[in-house]
Structures are given as structure tokens and as C-alpha cells.
Image (cartoon, helix red, strand yellow):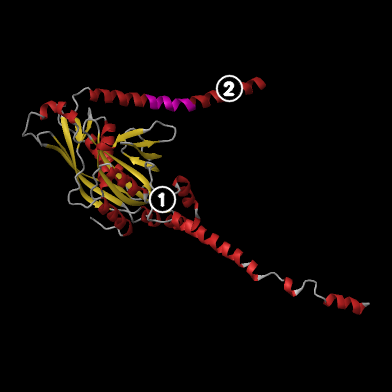
Amino acid sequence: MKTGKRVSWILLAMAIVTIIFSPPRLSAQTATVKSSSGNSASGAVQWSVQVDKVNPGDVDIEPAFLVAIYENLVDELGKTKRFQQVFRDSDRTTGAVSNLLILKTTVQKYTAGSETRREVTTVSGATKLSVRSQLCTRGGQVILERTVDGNVRFLGSNLRATHNLARNVAKTIKQSALPEPSLSVPAHGAL
Amino acid sequence: MGWAWRTYMNRRVVPTEHMPHSYMLIPHRIWAYLILLIGCAVGALAQNPSEPTIVTAPFSARVTHLLGFEGVANNAGGTLSIQGSALQFQKSGKPAMELKIASVQDVFLAEQSREVGGTPMTLGKAATPFGGGRVVSLFAHKKYDTLTLEYVDANGGIHGAIFQLNKGQGEILRNELVAKGVRVSQSEDAATKQRTAEEVPSENR
């Protein structure tokens, strides 16, 4: 009887160990598939992008927000792996880069929020940002144009809106189909 | 016997002529007044605003790096100081990151109100019954200065960095940077706008 009990306990322990360790293996397999598909995509010729300083347009917006949008855009575009390199505005090294796109961002709408009001009322005090993002070639052809929003409604500081906005811009660009660099650059009239 | 004792008690032990003379006390009072006067004068001279204390120590303050400074994590606390011709940010226990002041192109100063207490405060507010957390939120805010720097790297690429300082320190740092040749634009307007935005938020500005 005692031996049977011991065997059953061992079997139970083995089952628990199997259950605990099996999900990571599955997720690891998923990750491998994802990375392999990513590698196949990166085999093609990639664009590089230069992020221009954010244009405030006609909107009265604090300089800290413009700087925060710009910095967050540089970060988020780098995370997408969509571009070979991400350059900053006025970077002299872009002269040697052949497949370069320029990201121009113009603020269209800005609603200054209040962290205090958000926390006290929950429904008011949101910081709202809306920008027009354009991906242009060096020749000035616009190959992608989108209006993107970034808000902070509940938790977080006002500057968090710029992070959300940059993430949405990067997501939009990542999901959009860009023309092949070698095809689109010489063709000035295309798109 | 008893009468005789009373007689003795009625006698003056010290004669009237032997009372302490008033002229013996006057010099002590005068000395006391003089000492007090000298003390006050010395104190007043020490606090005389016409002779300002020369501050030679470079600017140094505890700040929070919100974003943008190369090589420093976002929302990292540390010490921001001016060391010669460089602006230095040092997080405790980590090597300092430097930025040449000559590479700073623009400085903007603004003011913002942020919640204090961090995660413990948020959890505490959430746990407070009957919506008491909202009342706490009304008072759990502090005003800070936000200093935004625009600078260029070695390749000419534009960077931006935002630091959060205690109220009043932003202006000191900005003045120090201006004294070292940094250009300032729209800073006063930005501060005013931020204050206005905190008080009366307007739609579609």
C-alpha cells in the first residue's frame, strides 16, 4: 500500500512539473516562428528614416511637448525594426544614405489637460494631441500621410500623451505598405 | 521676656545709610544696553543686503530626468550640475553623463503640477472608501519646474531633453546656462501658458 502511494505521489509531482514547464516551450516556439518571419522580411532592401523636428503649425503648444513628441518618435520608430536606420533632424551623416525617407510631423490639435482634474473627476482633464504625419522622399514626394491621435485620459502625466502619440505613429507606419526603395526613389512622379 | 524679644525684633539690623546705592546699579544697566546694542548692530551688519554673499559654488540640484538625455533612462532621478563648460547628470552609483553647454541650442522653462507619492499613494487612494481617494488627489500635488533643452550631437543631429526640478530651481539653472551663452526663447511665455493650462484648460488651443 505504502509503495503504491509513493508511486502515485511521484506521478503527481511529475504531472505538475510537466504542466508548469510545458507553456514556456510553446511560447518559445511561437517566438521562433515570429523571429524567423521577421528575418525573412528584413532580407529586402529597407528604407532609413530621418525624423524632422515637430512643427507646431498654428497650434499654441508648449515646447516641452514638441521635444517630447520628437524624442518619442525617434525611440518608437527604432523599435519597429521597419527602418534600417533612424536619423535625427539635421544629422550630417544622412548625406551618404541612399534610401532615406523624411518623417514630417505637424501638430493639428492640442488640448492641454490637467493631471489633478483627471484624478479628481476621472472624466475631464484629458490631454489630447492630434498630428499629421507625412513620410516624404528627399525629392518631396509624400508616400504616406496619416492623421494620428495620442491622448492621456486617466492615469499618467500630461507628457504621456506624447508617448502614446509616437507609439501610434510608429504603429501606423509599421502597418502601412511602403514602396520598395529602389523602385520609388528614381520615379519622381510616382505616388 | 516676651516684650524684650519683640523689642529686639523691631530693631533694624542694617542701618538706613547702608542700603545699596542706586549709583552702583546704573553702570551695570548701561553696560547691558551697550552689549545689547553692539550685538544688534553686528547682527544687522551681517544681514545687510547691500553686501551680497558671493556664491562661487556651481549649480547642483536633485532632478528627475523625464526623457531625452543620451544614455540616461527615462524618469531617472539624479543630480544635475554644471561642471565647468559641461552640464552633468549623475545617477547615484552610476557614471555621470555629460553634455557640453556649447552644444545647447535652446532652453525652455515651464511649470507643471504633478502628483506626489507614486505607486503607494495611488494604491492608498484606490483603497480609500467612499471616493476619499479623489479628495486626497486634490491635495497630493506639487508644482515643479520643467526645463527643456535642445542640443546637438557630434553629427549635428538634434536632441531634446526634459528635466523636472523643484520649483524655483529651473530658473536658477536657466540663468546659469544663459550666463554661459545659451540662447533662451519663449521661456516666459511657456511658463505662463502652462500655468494657464493647469488652471483653465481650453479646447483646441
* Residue B2 sits in quarter: bottom right
Give the residue at x 19% y 45%: A55
Residue B187 is left or right of residue B17, and the answer is left
Do tags 2 and 1 sit on the same chain? Answer: no
Foreground disc of the pair 2, 1: 1
Amino acid bearing label 1:
Glu
Above or below, A178 against B25 in this view is: above
* Disc 2, SS: helix
Give, as a single range, the part of the protein colored magenta: A19-28
Residue A166 is left or right of residue B119, and the answer is left
Give the residue at x 12% y 26%: A182
List x then y, in percent, for residue A10: 58, 22
Please, which residue is most extreme toward the left here? A189
Viewer-side residue, B52 vs A41: B52
Secondary structure mostly seen in magenta is helix
State the residue position of label 1. Answer: B115
**Dot 2 alpha-carbon crowd within 10 angstroms: few under 14, some 14 to 19, many 20 or more:** few
List x then y, in percent, for residue B23: 63, 69
Please, which residue is most extreme toward the top here? A3
List x then y, in percent, for residue A83: 22, 30
Viewport quadrant of the C terminus of chain A: top left
**Residue A23 magenta-highlighted:** yes
* Residue B205 sits in quarter: bottom left
Viewport quadrant of the N terminus of chain A: top right
**Residue A30 magenta-highlighted:** no
Give the residue at x 51% y 25%: A17
Viewer-side residue, A86 vs A191: A86
* Disc 1, SS: strand
State the residue position of label 2. Answer: A10
Whole-angstrom CA distance, mark 2 to mark 1, is 54 Å
**Dot 1 alpha-carbon crowd within 10 angstroms: few under 14, some 14 to 19, many 20 or more:** some
List x then y, in percent, for residue A154: 36, 50
